[in-house]
Amino acid sequence: MTLESQIESLTTNDIDPATRRAVRRTVVGGAVGSIVEFYEFSTYGVLATTLAVVFFPSTDSTASLLATLAVFAVAFFARPLGGFVWGSIGDRIGRKRTLALTIILMSVFTTLMGIVPGYAAIGVIAPILIIALRFLQGVAAGGEVSGAVSFVAEHSPARTRGFNVGMITVGAGTGTLLGTIVPSILLLTLTPEQMTEWGWRIPLLIALPLGIIGLYIRRRLDETPYFLSLAKQGDTSEHPIRSALSGSRQWRLLITAFLITALNAASFYMLAGYLPTFARTSLELTGFAALAPVVIAVACAIVAEVIAARISDRVGRKRVLMVTAIGHLVLALPCFLLITSGQFGLIVLGLVILSAPIGGYAAVTNSTLIELFPTRVRVSGHGITYNLSVAIFGGAAPYLLTWLTGMTGSMLVGAFYLMALAVIAIPVLLSITESAGKPLRTE
């Protein structure tokens, strides 16, 4: 089958069984990187209070925690750099090779974090090493999501593209779930002394075998027909970043994608990075009571992601995003009132309800973004906007909200944060053109 006929079959949804199997392998290969990426980020969020003791010892526990959360944010602020670097590479040499590099680099840097001696052993060098590795991990992660969603979208039939790309987000949810469960088990079974001595290392070291498995899967996949067709014609961009930033139309697309991503970044990373720490510090919960609600909420968010991704292929991306954005606006405050009640059952109820719009919005964000940009700059366009928005609205959220909670004394700042971003997202969503079921842009 020629490249042109492959692209035509994806556009018309006329694909044979062999192609369907190849698409499924592609989806798995794309999602595995998200599992690794979000496993590490979630692990760091759950272990924040332990890592504060190991790397940032202080008589002021709040100061130690804020320092740890600041390092959490470092990787996110490195992501835009990764978006520029890997976006350019992905649009010049191909999606497949880029994804092979990002997954192994993420795993290596995470594993190295797991073997760094603590502050008690090597002093100030320990936090410096952690900061450096977090930065490098963020640079590697900056190319992961953009490369994966481009790769899967360009292999997918138009009628199932939303679902297939949504599975990348399900992979992120799965990684978040694993990254919450694994350290949670250790926190529940080990003593605080054992956790600070060696227990915190185990979840980080697990990243290496996960990365090796992911690399094995990805090396067996084929490059996308869209990119191969572009390369065959000699039409790949020599300077994808410059092309993505050129012209008023491109800037409108970039701003639109940036603002759509803001709500997704804030809500998803609040669930994975902020709420586990919030439960132990502001709500003063311990053990099972602190960790179980977040695990349950993440599991519910995954279910919501699968459902929303499937529905988006039937009713359109725009409708799903609008409904879930309004869900954030309407449900954030009452859900936070339940969460801050301090009663286990009400905390679970609040998180489960809030997980529905969080998961639903997250599942459809990437397919919407990837359909905005043409093949020549698809990875770059997504990489620039997604990673910049995640850095500002997602990575900074745990630090900002922890600081604001301490400054204001209000435990509802997270709700108002989500509501403000929902208010921004809704008019932007009203302005976009529906892209579900349509061919990917090639120019």
Image: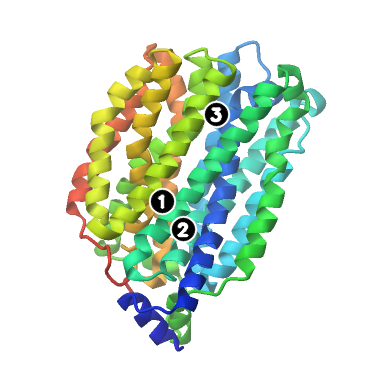
Q: Which residue is mark 1?
A: 386
> In the figure, is residue 342 to the left or right of 287?
left
Examine the rendering and report whether any part of residue 89 can be seen: no
Earlier sequence position, callout 2 versus callout 1: 2
> In the figure, is residue 437 to the left or right of 45?
left
**Which disc number belongs to residue 24?**
none
- Residue 20 percent across, percent down from the top left: 46, 72
Q: How many circles with numbers are drawn on the protein?
A: 3
- Residue 79 percent across, percent down from the top left: 51, 48
Amino acid marked by disc 2? Ser
Question: Tag 2: Cα neighbours inside 10 Å, few (<14), some, or many (≥20)?
Answer: many
Q: Which residue is mark 3?
A: 69
> In the figure, is residue 161 to the left or right of 111?
left
Q: Residue furthest front?
A: 17
- Residue 218 percent across, percent down from the top left: 60, 65
Amino acid marked by disc 1? Tyr
Secondary structure of residue under mark 3 = helix
Q: Residue furthest right?
A: 121
Q: Quadrant of residue 180?
A: top right
Q: Which residue is mark 2?
A: 146
Earlier sequence position, callout 1 versus callout 3: 3
Secondary structure of residue under mark 2 = helix
Depicted 106 relative to depicted 240: above or below: above
